[in-house]
Image (spheres, grey):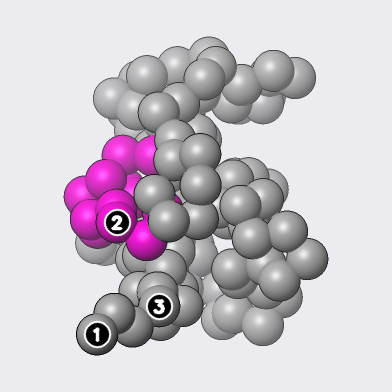
């Protein structure tokens, strides 16, 4: 599988505040759209063309995980949401794992409201 130079556009939050309001399901959909779109595929097409892990989700190669994480990191500028080099591989090796990682990082950074 070769990544295309220009990924198709996925539905994505345009602000940090929007990102904080995402549910785990919405984060997973954005991750799926981002990675599959890089190959010009739908999430279903991507999932059917890649290996599946024991958690039932597609196995990711590191560039795919980086693509998904960087999609969210771009919102935070220099204060990235996630530094993937500090994350154990098992936490980004599958579609489900990288989605959970991003969602958890969003929740941890979410401002507390009174």
Is 109 in front, or is 55?
Answer: 109
Q: To which residue does mark 1 refer?
A: 114
User: Crowding at label 3, few (<14), some or many (≥20) Cα neighbours within 10 Å?
Assistant: few
Q: Is residue 108 magenta?
A: no
**Residue displayed at 75% across by 19% down:** 5
| Structural distance between the alpha carbons of marks 1 and 2 | 16 Å
Does the image show residue 47?
Answer: yes
Q: Quadrant of residue 96?
A: bottom left
Query: How many numbered marks have been drawn onto this rendered protein structure?
Result: 3
Label 3, label 1: how far apart the Cα atoms are = 10 Å
Residue 20 in picture, x, y percent from top left: 37, 61
Main secondary-structure element of the magenta-colored stretch: helix
Of callouts 1 and 2, the N-terminal one: 2
Left or right, 67 with reference to 96 = right
Residue drawn 64% across and 60% down? 76
Determine which quarter of the picture holds residue 49: top left
User: Is residue 24 within the magenta segment?
Assistant: yes
Q: Which of pointers 3 and 2 lies earlier in the amino acid sequence?
A: 2
**Disc 1 element:** loop
Between 71 and 89, the residue placed more toward the observer is: 71
| Residue 111 - label | 3
Name the residue located 29 percent from the left edge and 53 percent from the top edge: 22
Task: Please determine whether, in this image, residue 42 is positioned above or below residue 102.
Answer: above
User: Which quadrant, please, contains the N terminus?
Assistant: top right
Closest to the camera, between mark 1 and mark 2, is: 1
Magenta stretch in the rendered image? 19-30
Residue 12 numbered mark, or none: none
Which residue bears the numbered disc 2?
21
């Amino acid at each position: 599988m070769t990544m295309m130079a220009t990924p198709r556009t996925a539905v994505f939050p345009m602000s940090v505040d929007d990102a904080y309001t995402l549910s785990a399901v919405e984060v997973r959909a954005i991750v799926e759209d981002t990675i599959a779109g890089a190959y010009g595929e739908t999430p279903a097409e991507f999932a059917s063309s890649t290996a599946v892990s024991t958690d039932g989700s597609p196995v990711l190669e590191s560039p795919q995980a980086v693509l998904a994480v960087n999609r969210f990191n771009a919102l935070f500028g220099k204060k990235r949401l996630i530094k993937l080099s500090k994350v154990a591989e098992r936490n980004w090796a599958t579609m489900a794992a990288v989605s959970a990682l991003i969602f958890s990082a969003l929740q941890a950074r979410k401002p507390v409201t009174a």
